[in-house]
Image (tube, rainbow, N blue to C red):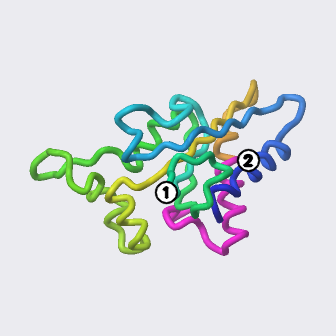
Amino acid sequence: MRVCDLQHLVEMFGDVVKDARSIELTVGRPWHFEHSYRESHPDFAKSPGVYVYSKPASPDWNLALERNTELIWYIGKSDSNLASRVWSHIGLTYDPETQRPCEPRFKFHQWAQREDVPFGIREAIATAQVVVYTIKVDPLGRPPGLAQALEKFLLATYYRATGSLPPLNLEL
């Protein structure tokens, strides 16, 4: 399943859960781990929502979600702080011996070390060649939990379309 498929799925989810107390789903700009981390945070940093990792589109990684035809690598959620959750997966890693930033930047990251993660994805993570898209879930007066519902909806749809979970979603 491709990143561009998400726009339609987010709209479909919004249609399914709408009622008198509507929700607002807003898709953020792409955020590249190597190019963006010094300048900004992912969109909707302190909001609940869903985030998606993928390979950067080539030659231009800075594509809107609906234009990015790269495969989805990971779908996750945060109930309160998207930026914190994004970094908890792939935050800045230091060499344990020298305490200095390592080269490549994320070579000690858990996903860069796992043999069950495809080699090309492990290498992309180790070298910070990852783009993240955030989708803000504003429940507009509803109780929390809609970010988790959207995440599970996207994962179930991915599974139905492909017969497996995204390569970095190692468990449901």
Q: What is the distance, in whole Å, between disc 2 and disc 1 at their CAs?
A: 26 Å
**What residue sits 30% from the left and 44% below the top?**
92
Q: Give x and y (percent) for residue 66.
A: 68, 50
Q: How many marks?
A: 2
Looking at the image, the residue that sits furthest to the front is 59
Q: Is residue 153 left or right of residue 109?
A: right
**What residue sits 57% from the left and 39% below the top?**
29
**What residue sits 41% from the left and 49% below the top?**
89
In the displayed structure, 113 sits above or below 128; it is below
Q: Which residue is mark 1?
A: 59
Local packing at callout 2 (Cα closer than 10 Å; few below 14, some 14-19, many 20+) is some
Q: Is residue 152 magenta?
A: yes
Q: Amino acid at mark 2?
A: Val
In the displayed structure, 23 sits above or below 149; it is above
Q: Give x and y (percent) for residue 124.
A: 39, 61
Q: Amino acid at mark 1?
A: Pro
Q: Which residue is mark 2?
A: 10
In the displayed structure, 38 sits above or below 140; it is below
Q: Is residue 160 left or right of residue 73?
A: right
Looking at the image, the residue that sits furthest to the left is 98
The residue stretch that appears in magenta: 150-172
In what element is the residue under mark 1? loop
Q: Give x and y (percent) for residue 46.
A: 52, 29
Q: Is residue 24 left or right of residue 164?
A: right
